Image (spheres, rainbow, N blue to C red):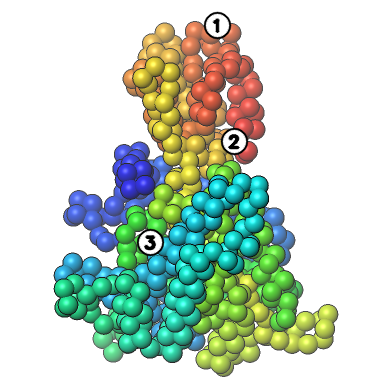
Amino acid sequence: WEDIFKKLVSHCKEYGFVFPSSEIYDGLGAVYDYGQNGVELKNNIKQYWWDSMTLLNENVVGIDAAIFMHPTIWKASGHVDAFNDLLIDNKDSKRRYRVDLLIEEQIAKYDNKISKEIERAAKCFGDAFDKQKFCKTNPFVLENIGKKEALCTRFAQASSKNNLEELHQIITDYGIVCPISGTNNWTNVRRFNLMFSTKIGSTADAKMEIYLRPETAQGIFANFLNVQKSGRMKIPFGIAQIGKAFRNEIVTRQFIFRMREFEQMEMQFFVRPGEEFQWFERWKQIRMKWHKALGLGNHKYRFHDHNRLAHYANAATDIEFEMPFGFKEVEGIHSRTDFDLNNHEKYSGKKIRFFDPNINKSYVPYVIETSIGLDRIFLSILAGSYCKEILKGKDSRVVLKLPPALAPVKLAILPLVRKDGFPEKAREIMDQLKVSFRCQYDEKDSIGKRYRRQDAIGTPYCATIDQNTLDHDQLTIRSRDTMEQEHISIDWLQKVIADKVNI
Ligand code: ATP
């Protein structure tokens, strides 16, 4: 997979999707810039999410809160005290590791062993295979289930008691980090707060330390009353927001999967206390349907329910996508209880309540959160669309089979040759269509090379202008996925392409 992933990363750079930030100064760790095609794809993903939240749900409205917020917000939310990762350093390699990710990897190893054994047995026994019975009786499977459960329990207990020595002991006992030839080459396990801070105010006296938000959610909680009152919203209702978030991540490999500056698309849905689990289930299904509608393959998604919960949650699940480096979280769905609003009430001294006329009672609402990393879904869409196809003869092509509605360019307009009035006609068509959807004019190189360039950025259709266009107002439409061509009349071009790309 490393090879495929490397190719995808260089493809992103070569075709203007993602560049390392400050590259002329050798880059900045885990910070990336989006190029001319990347920004279009990103904007289209945002629009797809925004519409699915705020157009399709009459009771979900949007906001755009500031990144800078009063520092007490982060005290109330628990981030100042608890937004920590556990880390451990290898003194030899000078590499830093996140303890929870090391444990997750170990758990995945046990899961892998178990599923391989089950697969092997299923092949041997054929139709007679009884999976449940096999898992309850096979010594190898039982041993690995036992080890995995013991690891999960020990880790949960040590984390909840903040017992750093025991955490170190666990990762040593399980061989996750091992001392080399008797010496301990690893540091102790430590906590590390992920928030970036800066100072606001212009004079030395008036300066106040503030944080760059590590999640967009708190901007929604802080505006709960404003939106509820000004919008006359009734529970249940939701507030959606897209915006930047910042985390001083410890482990930053894997390209845009884990960045220090990233974007989130979050929706906080406010419900009556006691009804949170049914809404949690409902949003889980809605969000999974949204992902699957992208058409990248239903088998690439799965839920991962959490056993260990964040300090604010009473239920949590991740939607994972099969990246080239395994199934990874792209979206978190959390039942956040009334933790945030309650604490904002305490810290601000303002009543943050909703009077529910149906039950004649006022209460602090419970919250279901859907939180998706825009950069991660961007990566999942690219990874799910990127393919190399072997064509007839020795020819091959790299093609991004992006969902057409998300493609940066919807239609390429290509004069067959740079003469005979073809470019002028192509420009005329371009001027008519560019107000409807994004078109790209290209006249350089052979038509075959131009098709490949459009395949590489995921353009779903190319229109070729030739003598037939001048003589009979007909042009050739070439489909990215099938590479088939059809002739259509210029008058139909706008409607045909708009229908095909769902605009
Ligand atoms: P992880 O366990 O991978 O660190 P998380 O569980 O801390 O992620 P959440 O706090 O639930 O993440 O954030 C919601 C979403 O924001 C995640 O599902 C992910 O898509 C995105 N996200 C979180 N951290 C990053 C990051 N450093 N870079 C890019 N996206 C991120």
Q: How far is the residue under mark 3 from the one under mark 1?
A: 54 Å
- Which residue carries the number 3 mark? 258
Q: Say which mark, if any, is on residue 446.
A: none
Q: Say which mark, if any, is on residue 501.
A: 2
Residue type, mark 1 in image? Asp
Q: Image height check: is 391 above or below 90?
A: above
Q: Is residue 92 left or right of residue 4?
A: left
- In this view, the residue in front, 149 or 402, is 149
Residues at marks 3 and 1 touching, judged by CB atoms closer than 8 Å: no
Residues at marks 3 and 2 touching, judged by CB atoms closer than 8 Å: no
- In this view, the residue in front, 447 or 442, is 447
- Residue 162's x, y, as percent? 40, 88
Q: Is residue 178 left or right of residue 398?
A: left
Q: Is residue 35 visible?
A: no
- Residue 248's x, y, as percent? 33, 71
Q: Image height check: is 420 above or below 373?
A: above
Q: How far is the residue under mark 3 from the one under mark 2?
A: 31 Å
Lower position in the chain sequence, tag 3 or tag 1? 3
Q: Is residue 94 left or right of residue 152?
A: left
Residue type, mark 3 in image? Arg
Query: What secondary structure is marked by label 2?
Result: loop
Q: How far is the residue under mark 1 from the one under mark 2?
A: 28 Å
Is label 3 within 8 A of ligand 1 (CB to nearest ligand atom)? yes
